Image (tube, helix red, strand yellow):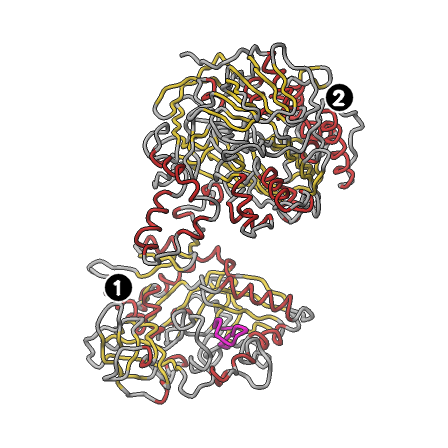
Amino acid sequence: MTQSHRLSGGLVNRDKPLGFRFNGVQFQGFEGDTLASALLANGQRLVARSFKYHRPRGILTAGSEEPSALVELRHGAAQEPNTRATVAELFDGLEARSQNHRGSLRHDLLAVNDLFSNFLTAGFYYKTFMWPAALWERFYEPVIRAAAGLGRLSMEPDPDVYDKGFLHCDLLVIGAGPTGLAAALAAGRSGARVILADEDFLPGGRLNAETHEVDGMPGRDWAARTVAELAAMPNVRVMTRTTVIGAFDHGIFGALERRTDHLAESGGKPRQILWRIYSGRSVLCAGSTERPIAFGANDRPGVMLAGAVRAYANRWGVAPGREVTVFTNNDDGWRTAADLSALGLRVTAIIDSRKDAYGTAPKGTEVIAGGRIVDTKGRHGLREIILQDGRRIATDCLAVSGGWSPNVHLTCHQRGRPVWRDDIAAFVPGGAMPQGMRVAGAANGALTLGAALRSGVEAAQAALSDLGLKSSKGAAPTASDEAAGVSAFWHVKESSGRAWLDFQNDVTVKDVKLAHQEGFRSVELLKRYTTLGMATDQGKTANVPALAVMAECTGRTIAETGTTIFRPPYTPVPIGALAGRARGKDFRPTRLTPSHDWAAEQGAVFVEVGPWLRAQWFPRAGETEWRQSVDREVLQTRAAVGICDVSTLGKIDIQGRDAAAFLDKVYINGFSNLAVGKVRYGLMLREDGIVKDDGTTARMSDTHFVMTTTTANAVSIFRHLEFCRQCLWPGMDVHLISSTDQFAQFSVAGPRARDLLARIVDKDFDISNEAFPYMACAELTVCNGVPARLFRISFSGELAYEVAVPARCGDAMIRVLMEAGRDLGVVAYGTEALGVMRIEKGHAAGNELNGQTTARDLGMAKMMSKKKDFVGKTLAGREGMQREDGLTLVGFRPVNRNDTLTAGAHFLPVGAAATMENDEGWMTSVAYSPSLGHSIGLGFIRRGGERIGEVVRAFNAVRGGEIAVEIVSPHFIDPEGERLRV
């Protein structure tokens, strides 16, 4: 298969041809090609359409800065949109498609937008779709959404695996070009732990694309030798295909490694890994990016950056065109002409914007000093350029160089603002750098090879010195400093047609001038008004020329105009990589209770409760619906004894001389007077006086307390207590530790609970009612010496205990309890039965503690101590929270006992219309009570405590219908609490 534009030489493996398809057409490339180089080798210049006007676009660059050549790779569930063809490695069988067009790539129906470009200028959407308002949802929005976006998602689950990892090093070197290689070599030879990360699959950077010499050998050979030496060092990790995407606090960097993107199949291995790198110091050697010059119709396929044309020729052995013209404002553009001519390509002309342009042009190449290109011709590919004097030059490739911009992006990630240097016509790092970062080479404005190599070594040595490490004394690699003169020339003012700045978002010089005209002159407003630099490339090639145009409009210098700063990530990061393995069932960890295996053996039905998987009920043979199981569990618990795993409750160990005083400050009721060996119920408020959480706290000794929280708030309460300890009262002697995972805890409830526990508690401990009364606690042993804690507390309203043992003993404990209680009629019950019994007893839970209720609403106003201060006390006293007609938690039962109550129903007076003005409250929790034989509920209603016995309507607009309900005490079972104290 012929590759019409393939040259000899390059760094591709011609012994390994690779077949691939683009838009269904079969092509061939070689191992070492990118998709872009392979397309150019096959003469394919048209590869994409622009975002807004759908103009034909080709390949502009040779690296990750590419704004135009975005394609879709692969197919089916593995389809990947918006991939830069310039960084996509070629593999055998690769399928690629152009995107963002209706119809074929050559005949895009949406190219009609270009005919209306005068109406679709910057900011048109702010002005166009305002009237008539009725058309927004009916017409404007559907049309815009249908046309918006670039690539297409497959809408199928991604079949690949992504991972995350952590790395540590003394020195992180970012970029494996000549500067990075020199820095890593100096640090590696010194024995420091070094990570060298580069986004390319072939280390060496521009050395692979140039004909420079280093240490007397071709630059690419020096790079290969240096990489081999680094790879052999045990203290150095070379990470190719790895982009450092962000600089974060404390010397931490994010990096995306593409592990199997270059393979047809990942083989089950991670496709990409998102690394968090902890570095002692870092050296940024990210190089620089070439800029275009804006002139009329400078976006045609075939118009490319000069450095990219040189790279395709030297590294990949590809001729982007047969008749090449160079348009430059700097000395580097002349190098492109020389390299292409040496490879046998015809360079028709060098057009230099400088009138005093000098240099040695290839034989037969015309030099046009002070020249300007004002227009180009060729709809789907460049055919001709037009100069300011009307002269036309036939060419199929225009190599444009507007100078080089240091890649300062990572230096901005902690608000560092670049500063302007006139001598190189570019921004360089400035302001606050990320902690421990140094910048070297072209990224710091050293745009010649010799200077870059020296600065890399110097930066590495200085970084090691900061760390107290000795550096090797070897000299920096030697290389000459090539000519690097540049003139600040940004756009051709003589152009009458549109001159493009941002090739992806279709921003032109005219758009920048319009922004100035309409008052959007700040660089930040310019960016947002025109969408400049807001595409996937973050304006890497467009920002500086556009800022220069704005500076001209305002009459200020570029330094006075300033620049926007960059945010992470440096290049786009797939959402899959950010998620890693946290997808599907692994989206968040599933935590299992200590008795999970035993419960699964019993056929339990499980339910997700926050991060936990808890047994919901335990079906038995012959039970055909869930309520039969739940009713049995409730009745058997109340008749005999039931066991429930409550290990998910938050458990916080609180110790210190001031532990009791600390609890006084976080609870509304007092704990200083709690006796050792006793438990007390407590209620916490937020700062605004709203209930935060409730639970019990046991005093194990004068300085030791054990707090329990609700399952849902286990983490947030621990965080809240730490905030109080560290920020509000840092002088208190109190220490906290979460012990939720350290204990397996079981509720043993029912009239036979004491009989069951007496069989497992060691004989040295007396748990009789007299020795161990209601709300007692103790540390004891069970099952012949296993350490345990026992609390006599009840959530069910029955005689009940909670026994806690080390988590490793949890599975054994549930088995021992069930076996020991076999003849007592023991039953395991799940969260549904637990919920039924707590509603029967009138205990508030998550439905009642919903972030909008107060202690008064819950009937606990008397618990609020007037003798001490506590979190939320002041704002809990606000007038609106003390209203006499405020909400109160009460019970409800249907007047017709056959009716079923529904949570969420709102209470209305009998005969009143269903309006917000007549709304008196709502039902929070409902259950069928097998003990009472009918539905019951808890809820809030105005003046509830005064209205016991009154009938109201429970109106449910969502489910439809209403039920007459009677207001009753929230304590449906044993309202006097006699069972608790037996």
Q: Are marks 2 and 1 in contact (CB under 8 Å)?
A: no
The amino acid type found where label 1 is placed reads: Ser
Question: Looking at the picture, how far across and down is residue 327, in whole percent?
Answer: 59, 24
Q: Give the structural element (helix, strand or loop) at label 1.
A: helix
Residue at the image position 26 percent from the left and 64 percent from the top: 629
Instruction: Identify the mark nearer the N-term, 2 or 1.
Output: 2
For the question of whether residue 680 can be seen, the reply is yes
Residue at the image position 59 percent from the left and 34 percent from the top: 491
- Image: 276 above or below 188: below
Q: Quadrant of residue 152?
A: top left
Question: Looking at the picture, how far across and down is residue 117, in whole percent?
Answer: 43, 40
Q: Which residue is mark 1?
A: 629
Of residues 130 and 279, the one nearer the viewer is 130
Which secondary structure type mostly characterizes the magenta part of the structure?
Answer: strand
Q: Is residue 509 left or right of residue 979?
A: right
Of residues 815 and 489, the one nearer the viewer is 489
- Image: 276 above or below 911: above
The amino acid type found where label 2 is placed reads: Thr
Q: Quadrant of residue 188?
A: top right
Label 1: how many residues lie within 10 Å, few (<14), some (14-19) or many (20+)? many
Question: Looking at the picture, how far across and down is residue 27, in whole percent?
Answer: 40, 18
The extreme front residue here reads: 389
Report the magenta residues as a range.
680-697
Q: Which residue is mark 2?
A: 478
